Image (tube, rainbow, N blue to C red):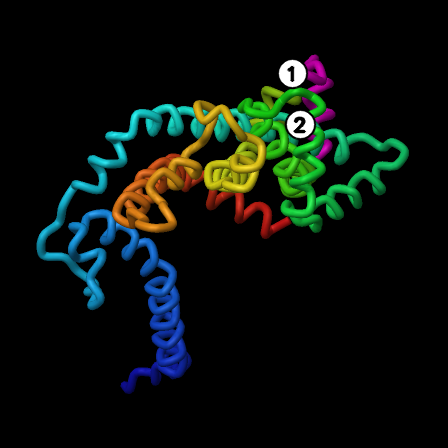
Amino acid sequence: MSLPARPLRGRVRRPWRLAAEASALLIAAVVAFPLYWMVLSAFRPAGEIESTEPRPWTLAPSLDSFRRVFGQQEFGRYFLNSLLVAGSVVIASALIAFLAATAVTRFRFRFRTTLLIMFLVAQTVPVEALTIPLFFLMRDFGQLNTLGSLILPHIAFSLPFAIWMLRGFVKAVPEALEEAAYIDGASRARFLWRILFPLVFPGLVATSVFSFISTWNDFLFAKSFIISDTSRSTLPMALLVFYKPDEPDWGGVMAASTVMTIPVLVFFVLVQRRLVSGLGGAVKD
């Protein structure tokens, strides 16, 4: 008795699958190469960095660039300032966005649609166009040369995207669940924090990642609002210590950039599972 012939569907698709995988690997290599070159330059000795014939490897790795970075007296202060600013923005924007997304999703009030449109319009305005007005605003409120001048603008720029993204998560929670909680005697605050908050937490993580990255890597606001008090500077400003127009210390710049990347990688590792489920929920919505 002869066996039925195997379908050729998988065989026909296999070359296309290999081509897709090869393309994905090529794109990943192109994206990862600048990071590899940054780390490689951080470990290169000064002679190799200044060489006119660069090579994609080094046979004599050195920690001199990292010693110069950590030898800077203010580097630790800059690092703590960046952590404080980024942490404050992540926590504040997540809580405000959660409450705002719940309000625009669960409640009906006048100008609700107008408010949502304003959130979209706020996303289209480039940050550079608002830097000068924000500078005068911070000056009038006496917030220049303070960490508050960095925290408040980043919260404002993080909220529109976070509210729009969390709106889909809140909307996905059935209203029957809320009604059942009220029937069981739960108050609105109890439902909000004990039931709704855990359900939309993956979305909060996804929005927090974008808030953290944009705040951590910010250079424009730090350069514009921190004018004279260098003790309030953040890590991106620390790169200027090693960049001199006449004789830039590229090893120090690359080493400082590598140190700046580590907290972002750690943050991704800690929230990667929640991040994937949060982005999946956003796409599904």
- What is the chief secondary structure element of the magenta stretch? helix
Judged left or right of residue 156, residue 110 is: right
Q: Among all residues in the image, which is located at the extreme front? A: 246
Residue 127 numbered tag: none
Which residue corresponds to mark 2?
138
Q: Which percent across, then down, holds residue 38? A: 30, 52
Q: Is residue 237 above or below residue 18?
A: above
Q: Which percent across, then down, holds residue 210? A: 52, 42
Q: Which percent across, then down, holds residue 141? A: 69, 21
Residue 190 numbered tag: 1
Numbered disc 2: secondary structure: helix
Identified at 43% across, 27% down, the residue is: 83
- What segment is highlighted magenta in the picture? 174-189
Identified at 49% across, 24% down, the residue is: 229
Q: Which of 47/204 is in front?
A: 47
Residue 201 seen in the current view: yes
Q: Give the spatial CA distance, label 1 vs label 2.
A: 37 Å
Q: Residues within 10 Å of mark 1 (few under 14, many from 20)?
A: some
* Residue 183 lies in the magenta stretch: yes
- Callout 1 amino acid: Arg
Identified at 71% across, 18% down, the residue is: 188
Q: Is residue 285 above or below residue 31?
A: above
